[in-house]
Image: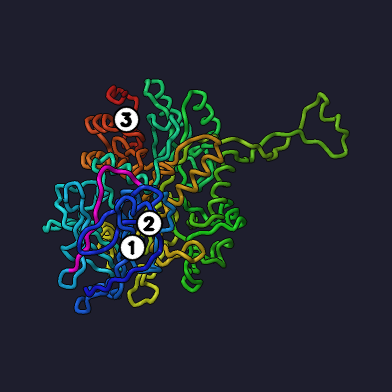
Amino acid sequence: MEITIQFITWALFCCLFWTEGVRFDCYPEQGASPENCNARGCIWQPTDEFIKLKKNGSAKSPWSNDINEIFFAANMIGKTLNVKIFVPGRYEPPVKLPRNPSTSKDTLQLATKENNKLFAFAVIRKSSKRRLFDTSIGGLIFADKFLQIATLLPSDVMYGLGEHLHPTLKEVITAPGPTLIYRTIGGNLDLYFFPGPTPEEVTQQYLALVGTPYLPAYWALGFQISRYGYKNLKEMEEIIGRNIKAGVPLDTVVADIDYMDRYKDFTIGKKTVIQDWKDLPVYVKELHNKGLRTILIFDPAIQVDHDSFKRAMDMGARFVEWERHDQVMRNIQDQYPLAKNTKIMLGVVWPDRHVAFPDFLDNNTAKWWTQEFVRFWKKDYFQQVKLPLHSSTDPPSNIFKKEPMRLQIEEVTKTITVPYDGIWIDMNEPSSFGTNENHPWYYNDADHPNIQPLFCPTNPQDSNSQWDEPPYKTQAVYQYGESAHLSSITLCMTAVQANGTHRFYNVKSLYGLTETIATLDAQYKATKKRGIVVSRSTFPSSGHYGGHWLGDNTATWADLQSAAIGVQEFNMFGIPYVGTDICGFNKPTNEELCLRWQQMGAFHPFMRLAYIQLTIAFWIAAEAPFFIL
């Protein structure tokens, strides 16, 4: 690349400027000024100087729309080095981070160089002169929807790359160089380097940037039991009762979506005797009397012909929506009067009808979400009672006569408290079943109506497809099949949020974080106590608001191994309240696997046995003494 150097003063800092030599920050504490720097013998230099980089005209990436001019800038946040390769005006995550200055006994130095008109930079540890990040290997690409940067880095010093469990995931890969390659399909490259030098100090420095972890309620650190597939409340009571009788040190009972009325949020199932959950509020109080707590699950998607959706519309809450009215799937939208004339994007999840996905980037949405949790904590129910029947012409005293009394059935409103203690939020990637599929899996499920799934603009010839069919589809997409799209099992990338100011393509990964923030506020305002919010989807800083479980797993030794890795990594990522579904959520477990999983899980801050229907029930408080910890 050709290189043009330009300096612009945006703020004041000291001692960091760009030459072929190396300068470093010699006044990292607060209060830097020309006088203080000069007194220390430092060189005062304005910060946020940047290098303007121009694309080498002879090179062209295969992913089209190369950007010809980009900028390179760096600044220090205490001892943390922030390097940014960017284009002004491109997408930046709308996440508020504390960005507090970090401390360290070590210092990182930044060196830049131009070799044969190719720009490179290196991050060097001052104490050892070792290069921690070195881009002289080349490979820097900055196209509109494909960004790549590579560094020389031996694989024996790498750890903590995150949840890259799929073997073909190519966003972070290694190469024989030895090199580490980062790829992304939007935004800018915003890199943070933490000097450590110990792993513990790296984590502390990272937390200074993203925020310290949320301190959960004490009870949330105890053993929890969850199951998907309870027939009714009676079955839950029987299983929990057996465990209590057997002396299992249980602290929390977790209710999955079975407790809902046809899987709708903020409801309790009471339609039939078989699915009867109407006494859940009473049972929760009984658990409290025994010193136990309750966590309830809630999904983000709201059925669009349900009362919760109407209240959302009345409060001005927003939902993820299409960019334009002509993109809306009218054959779906027109079925629902409340959504008929809107741009709200409708999908399919567990409920019987189509659902909408709350836009948690909107303040009104967060207020409505909180109101729903507060309302559900104290919920009004209609209860049938028998009342005396008398004529309006009879004197009131007639109803007290000693004679056979005629009765009538009336419905009266009764306020019942559902005093849940914590909240589990699931399906918040967000998930939408069957997107772009002509015959989704639920068409073969007797418990789910065959409603039409969401279809996104995926035809490359369609001008609307630029977001759903970018030039490069991340390799993680292909775990859903060779014909999969970015929108598979989720919403269309062309969707917008925050009143059209953010493209879903850019902010999808923030959905779980923004829901966690809103839900933590809702949990506290409903219960007036410290609790816990456990989320399936996370983003940097999620640990400041809640915890995480590693998602639905399978009863295999491979998943036990992955759990050991995942829990350690999320502790490094500032989400220490983390755990896994002990013994495996899917498929039958076995004695040896379940025993080893419990031994490991006992050391996890979030320790939950979670299973599906009959896959593990025979192990629980039966004649299996290994289960008792």
Q: 453 or 421, which lies in front?
A: 421
Asked if disc 2 and disc 1 are in contact, CB closer than 8 Å, the reply is no
Name which residue lies at 39% across and 36% down. 226
Alpha-carbon distance for marks 2 and 1? 51 Å
Q: Secondary structure at mark 2?
A: helix
Residue 411, labelled with which disc?
Answer: none
Residue 474 rendering spot, x and y as whole percentages: 27, 62
Q: Is residue 394 magenta?
A: no
Alpha-carbon distance for marks 1 and 3? 40 Å
Q: Secondary structure at mark 1?
A: loop
Is residue 622 visible from the viewing direction of this image? yes
- The amino acid pointed to by label 3 is Phe
Q: 269 or 1, which lies in front?
A: 1
Magenta part of the chain: 102-114
Residue 259 rendering spot, x and y as whole percentages: 48, 40
Q: Residues within 10 Å of mark 1 (few under 14, many from 20)?
A: many
Q: Residues within 10 Å of mark 2 (few under 14, many from 20)?
A: some
| Residue matched to label 2 | 34
Name which residue lies at 64% across and 40% down. 382
Is residue 554 visible from the viewing direction of this image? no
| Residue matched to label 3 | 618
Residue 486, labelled with which disc?
Answer: 1
Q: Is residue 207 left or right of residue 351?
A: left
Asked if disc 1 and disc 3 are in contact, CB closer than 8 Å, the reply is no
**Earlier sequence position, callout 3 versus callout 2:** 2
Which residue is at the far front?
39
Q: Is residue 109 magenta?
A: yes
Name which residue lies at 17% across and 53% down. 131
Name which residue lies at 33% across and 63% down. 486
